[in-house]
């Protein structure tokens, strides 16, 4: 089972006992110890924890500002706007036309998908990035990629921690 599914199931569990058949606490601990803002990324995106959004945004703004200064972004690019737009997109990136499936349903059957890619997302299952100030699109796209990379890194760290516990 993917770490995201395990995490979502664990954080929504009403039974966090840790015994021979229940291992929810291990997944939560592994994600929490994954480092960086990985725990917040998982919590806000995969558990839909709106109470942690502002904390995540604050940490993400700091990261974006640091990346902007290292990469010498132009002065007309508002770092706070890039941080907010990239995080909001990353949290809600599914294509609305195909509902994140990459293909539209056939006319005859709602559960059967067409062979052709969705015309809105071109089969990616992600909606196009839309920004208020067009020159920021490049930077928002770059920061969304960073969020994806950070989430993958946090998931890999969590999986590694879980596998370390399984070793003798």
Image (cartoon, rainbow, N blue to C red):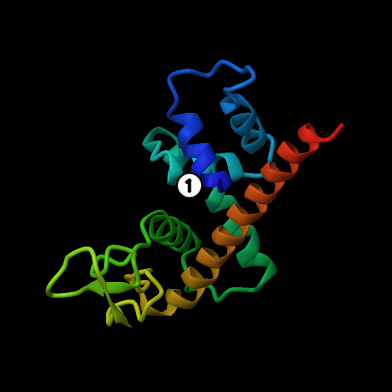
Above-or-below relation of 39 to 65: above
In the rendered image, which quarter is residue 19 located in? top right
Q: Is residue 12 left or right of residue 64?
A: left
The residue depicted at 44 percent of the width and 74 percent of the height is 136
Q: Is residue 44 above or below residue 114?
A: above
Q: Secondary structure at mark 1?
A: helix
Pointer 1: what residue?
57
Residue 48 horizontal/vertical position (percent): 38, 40
Within the image, what quadrant is residue 126 found in? Answer: bottom left
Relative depth, front residue between 83 and 16? 16
Picture coordinates of residue 120 (x, y %)? 28, 78
Which residue corresponds to the image point at 46% horizontal and 34% vertical from the top-left? 9
Measuring 31% from the left and 81% from the top, which residue is drawn there? 115
Q: Is residue 114 left or right of residue 138?
A: left
Residue 40 horizontal/vertical position (percent)? 53, 40
Q: Quadrant of the C terminus?
A: top right
Left or right of 119? Residue 86 is right
Q: On the rendered structure, is 112 left or right of 168?
A: left
Question: Which of these two is toward me, 74 or 38?
Answer: 38
Seen in the picture, residue 113 relative to 166 is either above or below; the reply is below
Q: Nearer the viewer, residue 81 or 152?
A: 152
């Amino acid at each position: 089972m993917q770490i995201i599914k395990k995490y979502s199931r664990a954080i929504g569990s009403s039974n966090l006992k840790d015994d021979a058949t229940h291992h929810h606490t291990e997944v939560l601990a592994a994600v929490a110890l994954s480092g960086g803002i990985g725990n917040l990324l998982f919590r806000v995106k995969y558990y839909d924890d709106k109470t942690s959004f502002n904390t995540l945004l604050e940490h993400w703004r700091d990261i974006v500002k640091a990346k902007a200064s290292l990469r010498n972004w132009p002065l007309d690019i508002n770092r706070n706007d890039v941080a907010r737009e990239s995080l909001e997109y990353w949290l809600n990136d599914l294509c609305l036309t195909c509902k994140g499936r990459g293909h539209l349903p056939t006319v005859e059957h709602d559960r059967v998908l067409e062979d052709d890619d969705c015309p809105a997302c071109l089969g990616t299952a992600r909606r196009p990035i839309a920004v208020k100030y067009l020159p920021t699109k490049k930077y928002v796209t770059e920061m969304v990629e960073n969020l994806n990379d950070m989430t993958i890194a946090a998931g890999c760290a969590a999986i590694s921690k879980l596998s370390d516990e399984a070793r003798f």
